[in-house]
Amino acid sequence: MDELVKQIAAQTGISEDMARKAVNVVMDYLKDKLPDSIAGQLDALLNGADLSQADDLMDMGKDLLGGLLGK
């Protein structure tokens, strides 16, 4: 999660503390909307788990966001 926080802070110009809060808000939202198995994978990825499944998870996330946005 630290790497994501740093990237958000660098790309947006907000503090790392604010970026961390934003990540937590988004994660809480996604965990509420996603099936438990996917939410668990998100937690694992943010906590430094093996990233070999990251591409599959990203594809699922894109599909979900496309569905939420009507695309």
Image (cartoon, grey):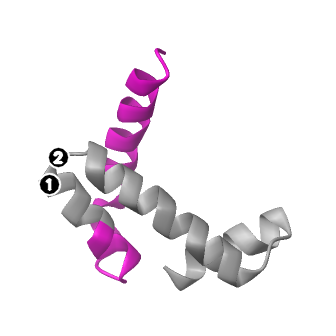
Count of numbered tags = 2
Q: Residue at x 27, y 74 (%)?
A: 44
Q: Residue furthest top?
A: 70
Q: Examine the structure image and report whether residue 63 is included in the region drawn in magenta.
A: yes
Q: Residue at x 81, y 72 (%)?
A: 14
Residue of label 2: 35
- Residue stretch in magenta: 43-71
Residue of label 1: 36
Q: Is residue 33 left or right of residue 18?
A: left
Residue 70: percent from the left, percent from the top? 46, 15
Looking at the rendered structure, the kind of residue marked 1 is Asp
Looking at the rendered structure, the kind of residue marked 2 is Pro
Main SS, magenta residues: helix
Q: Residue furthest left?
A: 37
> Is residue 1 shown above or below 35?
below
Residue 4: percent from the left, percent from the top? 58, 73
Residue 45: percent from the left, percent from the top? 34, 72
Q: Examine the structure image and report whether residue 26 is included in the region drawn in magenta.
A: no
Disc 1 element: helix
Callout 2 touching callout 1 (CB < 8 Å): yes
Residue 9 image-quadrant placement: bottom right
